[in-house]
Image: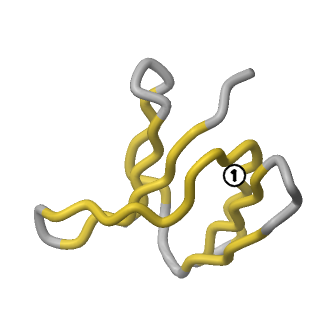
Amino acid sequence: MCELNVYLKRDDHETLVMEGVFVVKPEGEKVVLENLFGEQKVIEAKISQVSLMEHKIILK
């Protein structure tokens, strides 16, 4: 399985938003994140970078 950790980057600092994310859905100015257990978070941000090798998504 390929689960990702999602980080929010402000200035040059990354903060972990959610671990074990399986669904990333951009919706306008927001991004909806969902993990294996169906827990969701909605973040007001845009996708900046996706690194499958690092299992990491960076939002800005």
Picture mark count: 1
Query: Where on the picture, by quarter, is residue 54?
Result: top left
State the image coordinates of residue 14 (x, y, percent, origin top left).
26, 60
Camera-nearest residue between 42 and 37: 37
Query: Where on the picture, by quarter, is residue 33?
Result: bottom right
Quadrant showing the N terminus: top right
Residue at point 49%, 53% (across, down): 6
Quadrant showing the C terminus: bottom left
Camera-nearest residue between 10 and 35: 35
Q: Secondary structure at mark 1?
A: strand
Q: Which residue is mark 1?
A: 24
**Label 1: how many residues lie within 10 Å, few (<14), some (14-19) or many (20+)?**
some
Relative to 58, residue 10 above or below: below
State the image coordinates of residue 50 (x, y, percent, origin top left).
46, 37
State the image coordinates of residue 23 (x, y, percent, origin top left).
76, 48
- In the visual, does 8 lie left or right of 32? left
- In the visual, does 10 lie left or right of 49? left
Residue at point 11%, 62% (across, down): 12
State the image coordinates of residue 10 (x, y, percent, origin top left).
23, 72
Relative to 9, residue 57 above or below: above
Q: How is the image coloured?
A: secondary structure
Residue at point 74%, 42% (across, down): 22
Relative to 47, residue 8 above or below: below
- In the visual, does 53 lie left or right of 38? left
Q: Callout 1, which amino acid? A: Val
Residue positioned most to the right: 38
Residue at point 39%, 43% (across, down): 49
Residue positioned most to the front: 37
